[in-house]
């Protein structure tokens, strides 16, 4: 990973600015978890809960784009997950039963930093244990 700002790096900078913009908007908006939970038993026969809500400007800002932005995020996550997969590195290994695996996209040793970043972001700590690799015995780690 490079820290120096190259001229051709501006798409990278724009991408970061866009992500940080979404992050800031989302962070400023109210969480709906505690508001939504008590409303669930009130769903009527038509499948709706008629509510009146007080929305701040930040909430409206967030809500107006939340669906599209979340869809973009999940699409991105799924594409990254497809890109960063383990493959058998082949070559020299001291243990034929447990070959060294590398990411087929970035070639880091598996689990690669991108995959680890995704698991840390989306899974709880007890779900981020040793990754299951097809054909590998869990006890081999
Ligand atoms: Zn990778």
Image (cartoon, helix red, strand yellow):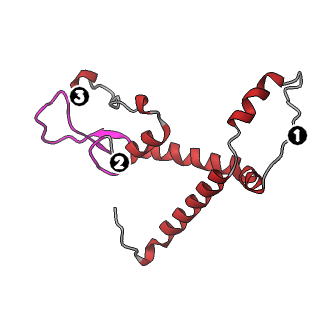
What is the span of residues highlighted in magenta in the rendered image? 84-110
Residue drawn at point x = 72 percent, y = 29 percent: 37
| 6 is within the stretch colored magenta | no
User: In what quadrant of the picture does the C terminus appear?
Assistant: top left
Q: Overall secondary structure of the magenta stretch?
A: loop
Residue 113 badge: 2
Q: Going from the N terminus, do you reach mark 1 or mark 2 first?
A: 1
Q: CA distance from mark 3 to mark 2?
A: 18 Å
- State if disc 3 and disc 1 touch (CB < 8 Å): no
Of labels 1 and 3, earlier in sequence is 1
Q: Say whether disc 3 or disc 2 marks the residue closer to the N-terminus.
A: 2
**Residue 24 percent location from the top left of the image:** 61, 57
Closer-to-camera residue (64/56): 56
Q: Which residue is nearer to you in this view: 16 or 109?
A: 16
| Coordinates of residue 98 in the picture (x, y in percent) | 20, 30
Disc 2 residue crowd, few under 14, some 14–19, many 20+, Cα 10 Å: some
Residue carrying label 3: 141
Residue displayed at 49% across by 39% down: 122
Q: Is residue 14 left or right of residue 108?
A: right
Q: Nearer the viewer, mark 1 or mark 3?
A: 1
Label 1 to label 2, Cα distance in Å?
45 Å
Q: Residue at x 36, y 72 (%)?
A: 4
Query: Does any portion of residue 84 appear in the rendered image?
Result: no
> In terms of depth relative to the viewer, which is nearer, 3 or 137?
3
Secondary structure of the residue carrying numbered label 2:
helix
Give residue 116's position: percent from left, percent from top. 38, 43
Q: Which residue is mark 1?
A: 52
């Amino acid at each position: 990973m490079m820290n120096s700002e190259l001229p051709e790096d501006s798409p990278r900078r724009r991408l970061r600015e866009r992500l940080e913009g979404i992050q800031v908007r989302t962070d400023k908006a109210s969480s709906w978890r505690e508001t939504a939970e008590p409303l669930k038993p009130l769903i009527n026969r038509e499948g709706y809960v008629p509510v009146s809500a007080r929305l701040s400007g930040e909430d409206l800002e967030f809500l107006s784009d939340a669906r599209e932005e979340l869809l973009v995020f999940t699409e991105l996550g799924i594409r990254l997950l497809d890109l960063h997969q383990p493959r058998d590195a082949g070559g020299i290994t001291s243990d034929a039963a447990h070959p060294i695996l590398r990411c087929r996209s970035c070639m880091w040793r598996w689990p690669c930093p991108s995959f680890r970043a995704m698991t840390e972001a989306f899974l709880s700590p007890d779900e981020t244990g040793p990754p299951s690799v097809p054909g590998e015995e869990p006890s081999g780690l």
